[in-house]
Amino acid sequence: MKKIGIINGVNLNLLGKRETDIYGNTSFEQYFKQLKGLYPQMELSYYQSNIEGALVSQLQEWGFTYDGIVLNAGAYTHTSIALADAIKAITTPVVEVHISNTFAREAFRHHSYLSPVVAGIIVGFGLKSYNLAIESFI
C-alpha cells in the first residue's frame, strides 16, 4: 500500500470559511474523508500548519519514508526558500497543489519558489487538484 502525505500550509485551516468564492464551502477535513473513501488502496495522511518551520519539519519527517507528498503551501509558495530547500533535501517526490489558478490572480502569486524543485504542479481545479496529485502517484 502506497503512503501518500498531504501537507497544507498557511490559512488552509480556514477552507470552507475563508474566501468561499475562491476556495469553496468545504473544509479540508471534510474533503480528506472523501479522499480516503476514493483511495482505499492508499494510506493517506494529513497535516496542516500555519507555521513555516513546522511544514519544513513535516516534509523532513515524511520525506524519506512516504511514496509521495502533496503540498499546498499556501502563501509560503511565494516566499519560502526554506520549504524549497526542504523539498530538495528529501527523496520522496512532492507535487505542488493550488486550489485556485494562481496565474489568474495577483502578480505576486505567479512566482513559486517551490515549482523548480517539485515533481509536478497542479493549479486551478479546486479541491479536485488534490485528487489529481494523488492520481499522479498511482
Image: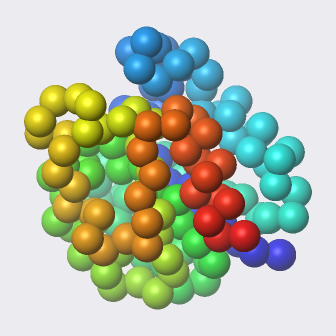
Up-down: is 111 above or below 27?
below
Res. 111 in view: yes
Q: Where residue 114 sits: x, y (%)? A: 28, 63
The residue sitting at 87% across, 64% down in the picture is: 41
Which quadrant of the rendered structure holds the C terminus? bottom right
Q: Left or right: where does residue 43 sit relative to residue 109?
A: right
The residue sitting at 70% across, 30% down in the picture is: 30
Q: Left or right: where does residue 86 sit relative to residue 27?
A: left
Up-down: is 133 above or below 107?
below
Q: Quadrant of residue 80?
A: bottom left
Q: Left or right: where does residue 51 sit relative to residue 4?
A: left
Q: Where residue 73 sits: x, y (%)? A: 36, 50
Q: Where residue 109 sits: x, y (%)? A: 20, 40
The residue sitting at 54% across, 74% down in the picture is: 62
Which residue reaches farthest left? 107
Res. 49 in view: no
Depth check, front residue: 129 or 36: 129
Depth check, front residue: 127 or 88: 127
The residue sitting at 51% across, 81% down in the picture is: 92
Which quadrant of the rendered structure holds the N terminus? bottom right
Which residue reaches farthest front? 104
Q: How is the image coloured?
A: rainbow
Q: How many marks?
A: 0
Q: Where residue 129 sits: x, y (%)? A: 55, 44
Q: Left or right: where does residue 46 sit relative to residue 64?
A: right
